[in-house]
Image: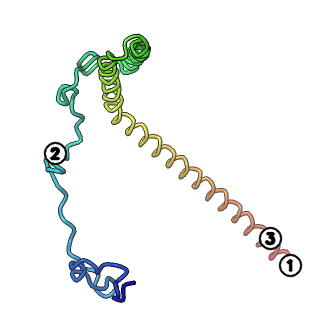
Amino acid sequence: MATGTAASYPPPPPYYRLYSDYSTDPDSAPPPPLPIEGSYPLYGATYTTEAVLPSLEDQGVRQLYPKGPNIDFKKELMSLNRDLQLHILELADVLIERPSQYARRVEDISLILRNMHHLLNSLRPHQARATLIHILESQIQRRKQAVEDIKRRREEAQKLLKESIQILDSQ
């Protein structure tokens, strides 16, 4: 059994001295670093702060649906889904008859799934706008209900005041 004493927690990092008591000096903390703009390296890869969905070609993946701005997402996703189902059935067939030749089918399935994932990711901005519209509409509805409730309570209060005044005048 060790006779030496050991701290249960390590000491705080040295930069804690940069901060003093917030209640006595709210400006004691150093300002936070400025946000990163442009590209930056992280874990050996270069990332960018731009919110742009890279194309499938940029990712080295073959695009299975037509290129262009006028894509019918529903039609293309349904088509890719049918292809996926067909390729999964073919994979099951290959695994039964020729198990050593399954790799090509798995690659095809992976390609279809990546295309479906890219199509769904390209719908994210539309989903965000629709969600924001829904949130704002529900906030407007709640505020209108609150205003109506305040008006109703004000009318009740005025009615009670009038009744009280009448009762006091009649006495």
In the image, taking residue 138 as reference, residue 42 lies left or right, namely left
Tell me which residue sits at (17%, 55%) in the image. 36
Disc 2 packing (10 Å; few <14; some 14–19; many ≥20): few
x 13%, y 47%: residue: 39
Secondary element under disc 3, as helix, strand or loop, is helix
- Helix, strand or loop under label 1: loop
Q: Disc number at residue 45? A: 2
- In the image, 5 versus 162, the foreground residue is 5
Q: Pick the quarter of the image with the N terminus.
A: bottom left
Of residues 62 and 146, the one nearer the viewer is: 62
Q: Which mark is residue 166?
A: 3
Query: Which residue is at the front of the view, 2 or 128?
Result: 2
User: What's the amino acid at mark 2?
Assistant: Ala
Percent of width and height locating residue 118: 30, 29
Displayed quadrant of residue 167: bottom right
Residue 70 drawn at (x, y percent): 29, 19
Identify residue type, mark 3. Answer: Gln
Q: Which residue is mark 1?
A: 171
> Quick one: label 1 or label 3, which is nearer the N terminus?
3
Residue 99 position (above or below residue 14): above
